[in-house]
Amino acid sequence: MQVFNHVEEKYWGAFHDYVFEIAVLTVLVAPKPFIIHKFRFGFVDFLSKLEYFAGICGVGARLVARRRQNSRIANFQWAYTRAGIQQLMSSPTTSAAAAEAINQFDLGEQYAAIGAEVRAAVDRVLASQQLVLGQEGLALENELAVFCGTTHGIGVASGTDALILALRACNVYAGDEVLIPTLTFVATGSAVSALGARPVFADIDRATLNLDVSDVRRRITPKTKAIIAVHLHGLAADMDPLREIAKERSLPLIEDNAQAIGATYKGRRTGSLGDIACISFYPTKNLGAAGDGGMIVTNSADLDARLRTLRNHGQASRYISTEPGWNSRLDEIQAAILRVKLRHLPAWQKARQMNAVKYSKLLAGVSGVRVPVVPGGYEHVFHQYTIRCERRDALQKFLGERKIGSTIYYPVPLHLQPLYSGLGHKPGDFPNAEHVAGEILSLPMYPELSEDKIERVVATIAEFARQ
């Protein structure tokens, strides 16, 4: 990019090169919101003069060329040209309307990076014309079972179907009770209801947002046939005491691992911590398909055999059905896409964790905001980065006005959902879940989220906190 057409001065070039470089580095080292909002006009005017002298020496173009690849300088490369400076100084403020939107998640960036691999995998399946219960599905089942630390994987049509089939494989029928957390996505409860069973809700721990083990113990009855432990937002539930309770009562312990694939608890991955675990491949999950999909993983050969029957119309052999079943099979195209993504999952997980570290470090000094808790011995995979704020609704509105996406997972606990009004619960029955549901807010989180965007999100929250 040519900045000026002036002839370079023979003896003054080096001097002006250093002067201009110092000025640019000052911009980059100082916090960007501080520069833009506090010293915008004076400092940019200062840069304009330096840019003029550097341009006379012909170094402006060299600086741009040398630093084009630097992402922090790339954000300010408009300031190296007189046109860029004039544009900045002519606009009265950095308005929300002019700001780039920051989505709560962005699948487009992921596809831009791996699109060629995905298309090759899809072409491979289409060329084979083996579209259901083929080699891609078998390969994914084996690969994901190994990833989770189990011996069996059974692909199904969705994460919800995974829960329904897992409950039936554990002999849950109409009239039975299944213990679940009240702060979770409705699918955890509706899977129980789909079998005619009754969900029995338990409160959560306010720090981890997962099951309160002491409340679980209090709510078990002779009708209880299973416990579902949800690993919410990417953090494992406290599984050791839950396993102890399940063992004492001879109850199957089912993991709802829709949001925490790859997370660990005391050195073991989620999916291997209970009797059976359910995974969702909804597109926004850490490992997401190009549509719906799910999987069940287990170490039990008996459960594996029954689940394969249940997912395919109850057929134990071709056209011979031994019990009512479902049409719930993961198709080959989705399996092929997921195999591509599974190879990238460890790197994506690391990127999420690094983004979470940046968020927590920057938010540490912001009043009125609580960052996610990660207990010792746990590895959080941050399907969501969820903060807590007493003025949550106002904060979400403030972020939205500045084109920053956020989501509440979940605003209404299950015991207060209209779906379960017939169970007779009322506000106050589960105080921890109700309190937390009024405070939680999930910020933008995905592997490709840039540091600049994280800084802007935090700067906006800090601006809100000062009001």
Image (cartoon, helix red, strand yellow):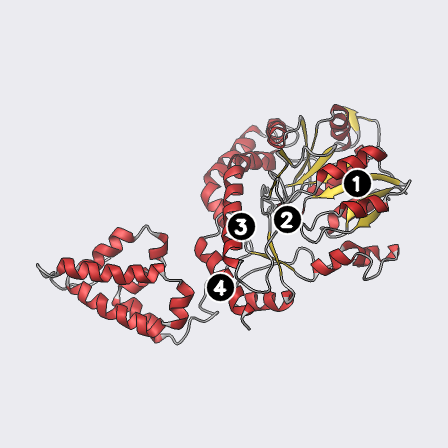
Horizontal relation, residue 27 to residue 175: left or right: left
The residue shown at (47%, 41%) is: 114
Disc assigned to residue 227: 1
How dense is the environment of label 3, judged by Cα within 10 Å: few (below 14), some, or many (20 and up)? many
Residue carrying label 2: 233
Residue carrying label 4: 459
Q: Position of residue 128 (x, y in %)?
A: 56, 28
Q: Is residue 324 above or below residue 372?
A: above
Q: Position of residue 234 (x, y in %)?
A: 62, 45
Q: Is residue 72 above or below residue 236?
A: below
Secondary structure beneath dot 3 equals: helix
Q: Position of residue 199 (x, y in %)?
A: 83, 47
Q: CA distance from mark 2 to mark 4?
A: 23 Å
Horizontal relation, residue 161 to residue 250: left or right: left
Residue carrying label 3: 356
Q: Mark 4 or 3 closer to N-term?
A: 3
